[in-house]
Amino acid sequence: MKIKSTFVHLANSVLPVLLAFLIGGIIIAMLGENPLDTYGILLSKSLLTSKGFLTTLHYASPLILTGLAIAITFKANIFNMGVEGQMLLGAFFSGIIGAYLPAGMNSVLAKIVCLTVGVLCGAISAMLPAVLKAYFKVNEMVVTLMLNYAIIKILEFLSTGVFRDITAGYVCTPTIQKNAMFSRLGSSRITAFFFIAVAAFAVMYFVMNKSKLGYETTAIGKNPEFAEATGMKVHKKILMLMAISGALSGLAGAGYMMSEKFKFTLDFSGNPGLGWDGMLIALLGAHSPVGILIAAVFYAALKTGADNINLYSMVPKEIVAVIQGLIILFLSIKFLSENSVTGPKIRSLFAKLTNRKAGRENK
Amino acid sequence: MNLLNSILYDTIYHSAPIILCVIGGIFAYKANVLNIALEGMMLIGAFVSTLTAFFTHSVLLGVLLAILASTLFGLIFSFFGVTCKGNVIITGLAINLLATAIAGFVLIQMKTSNITLSYLNIADLQINIPFIRDIPFLGKILSGHPIITYISFLGILVMWLLMYRTKFGIYVRVVGENEDAAKSLGLKTDFYKYIAILIGAVCCGLAGANLSTERLGLFTNGMTAGRGFIAIAAIYCGGGSPTKSAVYAILFGLARSLAVNLSIYAGPAAGLFDIIPYVMMVCVLAVVSIIKHKNNKVRGFQYE
């Protein structure tokens, strides 16, 4: 039974991806390119070469964190759509602190300070919707979405005004100090931030699967009134979960700032943004930590691959955004459910076939 | 006086697309489907209308195709959300992402970052209503808007009639309030949900066409800037009543118009004025929720 349910889970994650790739392939074919070649470039350059794979892991690090940030709240049926904003806030302020730190500071200390600032910013900004949700029953989805726009506008204001690096030819904040940057390991692009992300993953794995809080999260997600009736303090749990979610988002932003971007630009998080990517990853991984880890790597592979298809073929990399949208669309429905109609049907079909075979052999 | 005038004019101007989204989204809300795809439907409407108008030089055709495109998105949304019983929030998010992705993809193919209708003079699309425009103060505020703006304000009345004075409206509300009861009466619940979502899609298509082609003659990706979500917030605040929710939509229009008009006087802090509408929406939502639950004496935690 266990095997069957994992199989169903796996099929529900893999089928949408395949279907989305199929439709994406049709679009590529309509552009007059060979879809198989394009997908070949997409995957081989990002997963099959060691350098490409390390780049993929590098890009996967913030995605693992935002994916976990989404998953922990979605699991409790709280829709924290503000991961994007919290991530940007964490990134911005860790970047600002990183830029104004004394240059001679101990490099480990500098990194710790920057990361802490990022984590705190993320967690604190997640508190407002959490308090509104827990104590005043304000719909958290709308609030977090609105705050996303507000945060983006504020950061735009700050980075074009007060904190603008005047020496640069475009809008950005000053570059962070050398001692706050994560240096690349060897010739690959991977940095120590990847290991921090993996450590955070390990902690979250423990929290979500083995701890009391993880159990309570699932209980609240299934039925908050029952959870309250059995003695869980749902208000406090909501605050705690949102704080964790915000902290993870902030960490993702700070780490991305210190390992990849080094300064805050207006397109810091790319399109559609690390927070939104995190949502796809959490869905793809069915809100389980291990699933998220795999999904994040797969997703980062798409990202690195997208840059490569831009280089090696005529297909624009925006096709990947279309494929992502399709993946989410197909993920919203369950292709196979654990007690679906198709499962038994297929089984009965197999049973019939084997019976017939058996019958033939008997004859 | 001049400032007040332009603030009020802009209030109507900025309210229109949101009112359209609100009155569209209300039917889905009443049918108990959380339609967060409003944003995406509006964006695809904006995109298709400008794209069509760009190639065919016909604004009317642009508006029609915009409605068609957003209806198509509405169909996808309802197929996945209603027929396949998927998670509507995730489906809605997917629609939003898809709309941005498709627009971005086509823009890249056209090798531009935005579509500008250079042949179009926006002033030509503004309609001056005879008699009303001659009223001293009000004339300048009420007259001189593009046609969809007028449609949006008329739409409030139409939607109110449709929801509270027709059989169809009653059926939609029954489906939303108690689906099992509706089924037991022999109502085709899925059918009413489909129609509710599609009404929203048509309105969003209009809103998109209003936003891009009619008002600016320009499309840039992401130009809807969360208006769909603001509409959802307005629906929540208004508790699903067309008139009340429309009032909140106008309130947002006012905030936006204040932000635009006052930022001229703000100097370097002008950028900060853009956050007024979003922050105000959060405050309004919070206040409304607090008032609604003030006399709630239920012990413990209640979900929604």
Image (cartoon, coloured by chain):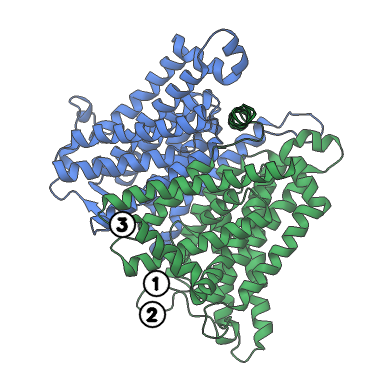
Nearest the viewer among A173 and B265 is A173
Say which residue label 1 marks: A171
Q: Do the residues labelled 1 and 3 touch (CB within 8 Å)?
A: no
- Residue B220 is at least partly visible in this image: no
Disc 2 sits on a residue from what chain?
Answer: A
Counting residues from the N terminus, which is met first, the one under dot 1 or under dot 3? Answer: 3
In this picture, residue A47 sits left or right of residue A122 = left
The answer for how far apart the CA atoms under marks 1 and 2 are is 7 Å
Q: Which residue is drawn at 62% across and 74% down?
A: A193
Percent x, y of residue A241: 72, 52
Chain that is coloured blue in the picture: B
Circle 1 SS class: loop
Q: Please tell me how crowded label 2 is: few (under 14), some (14-19), or many (20+) other residues with Cα within 10 Å.
A: few
- Residue bearing the label numbered 3: A34
Query: Chain A takes which shade in the image?
Result: green
The image shows residue B277, relative to residue A200, as above or below, that is: above
**Kind of residue at badge 2:** Ala
Image quarter hosting the C terminus of chain A? top right
